[in-house]
Image (cartoon, grey):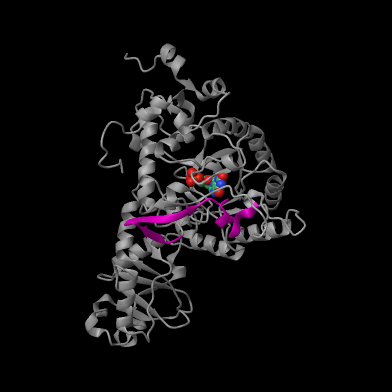
Amino acid sequence: MAATRDTGLDDSFYQPADEFFPANHKIGLTFDDLTLATLYSEILPRDTQLDTTLAENLRLNIPVISSDMDTVTESRMAIALALNGGLGLIHYNMPERQQLSEVSRVKFHVHGMIQEPIKALPEQHIGDVLKMIEERKFSFSTFPVVDEKGKLVGLLSGHVVKPRYAKRKVAEALTPRAQVHTLNKKELGKDPIARADKFFNEHLGIHKLLVVDDKDHLHGLITLSDIERLAAERNAQFKPARDASFRLICGAAVSATRNAFGELDRERILTHVGGLVERGVDAVAVSTAHGHSKGVGNTVKVLRDAFPKLPLIAGNVTSAAGAEYLADCGANAVKVGQGPGSICTTRNVAGVGIPQMTALYVCSRAAAKKKVAILADGGIAKSGDIVKALTLAQAVICGGIFAGCNEAPGEILEIGGKLYKQYRGMGSFAAMKAGSAARYGQPTNPTQKVAAEGIEALKEACGSVDRVLAQLIGGIQSGMGYLGAANLAQLRDKARYIRVSPAGMREAAPHDVVELKTGN
Ligand code: XMP
């Protein structure tokens, strides 16, 4: 039989984690400091499974989470992540009330239903509608028409949204309410896509279905083309991450909030997290720069006592003691990373932090003892980094990779003919002023002196989350194929590492060519 393994020679060069990291214990290593060795494989990348368990009742279909940062994750990003099988953590740099409604938006998101369709008002002119289409660059021209209270009065069909009717009122041109096809939102049931699909089958030639409540207030719009696209997606390899009631999953971050006396504000934390739980939040992350601290530990304990079944994520730490401490306090998953992030300056400002692969190794061994998951948070610039992180962690948390996506908060800016989106550290002056100072243990009063631990930056606009994730997932699956790993547990088991020299690092990137096109 042909040899599939040379245990002697290979093993002396390419070492498993428990030999490699202890052998390099005098130096902190990050992603580019090491590479993974290939192994005999019978696994095709497309056949690999990426599902991961972060807590008994928190399972993802892909091991990717978007950061709780105010330029990364609000409801649109969380919806996009969950639709792809991952999880978004809604940031807390906003009033608590607003965070509750961001979570609600994700939980009420009916895949395939446009929840806040653009509407027209009966007293508008068709000319106003044409102007709105032009200004906001809509690619559609059919609009539900509602009165000032949001009650449905009809549908303005694209056939009449023409310059020749510009002076006509919407009220004259609309298809009246009685002739508009609607479903009550209660009728959507557990599988709204199947229900809408059935409706379109039964109603030949109808392309739009409006969703209303008992008072006939408009709640959404479902289009035939979206339903057809979704039916195709059902055969996709990675299904959306949903809860037991078929709703998309959503996480939210909180801080270890203190009261005016500097004590942990238990009541406020419990009231807010109670609100999140009522809205169906699937995980709460106690998210701070220094997780191995009394305030964070006590917050986790308070939440664990009050919500025994709620998946809790806590961090950030980079030591075994830190990971064990948070696990003992009740966390199900521990965030690992201090200073690796693309916008972080903690290592420069505070002189503190550990290169990410070493931190992940140390924390992963402590977490395994305590039977909790670890999340590799920050510093991920390419899919190869994710593969390396997943040899030690159960999932990765990414900020910068998603900050240029359409679904990230903020407008697209045009600078010198290129398109960008703003991306800032939660420890930057601007973000701390907007509320995140507590995360860095800095005074929340903006007039006091604070030390920023993050920068404000730009990311090139990079299209949809779907597109970015397709590239990342392709890379993860490719890495698993090279290691003969059919799933993430096998990837963790099989990984073998070797240090890379600076010349080896240069060799890894395109070199000695004039690059015409990047990989994507
Ligand atoms: P990436 O590399 O994905 O990193 O952009 C995102 C992660 O960085 C952390 N974060 C910060 N760390 N100062 C820091 O030292 C900051 O201002 C800051 N803001 C975010 C956070 O863990 C995030 O997920």
Q: Residue at x 40, y 64 (%)?
A: 113
Looking at the picture, how far across and down is residue 83, in whole percent?
42, 53
Looking at the picture, how far across and down is residue 114, in whole percent?
40, 66
Compared to residue 497, the image places residue 164 above or below, namely below
Compared to residue 350, the image places residue 223 above or below, namely below
Compared to residue 428, the image places residue 360 above or below, namely above
Looking at the picture, how far across and down is residue 52, in whole percent?
49, 40
Q: Residue at x 67, y 59 (%)?
A: 445
Closest to the observer, 293 or 456: 456
Compared to residue 200, the image places residue 229 above or below, namely above
Residue 57 visible here: no
Closest to the observer, 192 or 10: 10
Q: Quadrant of residue 216?
A: bottom left
Q: Which residues are magenta?
A: 410-438
Residue 422 visible here: yes
The single residue placed furthest to the right in the displayed view is: 261
Lateral position of residue 310 relative to residue 124, left or right? right
From the image, which quarter does the N terminus lie in? top left
Q: Is residue 416 magenta?
A: yes
Q: Residue at x 52, y 56 (%)?
A: 70
Q: Is residue 153 magenta?
A: no
From the image, which quarter does the C terminus lie in? top left
The single residue placed furthest to the top in the displayed view is: 8
Looking at the picture, how far across and down is residue 109, in whole percent?
46, 62
The image shows a total of numbered marks equal to: 0
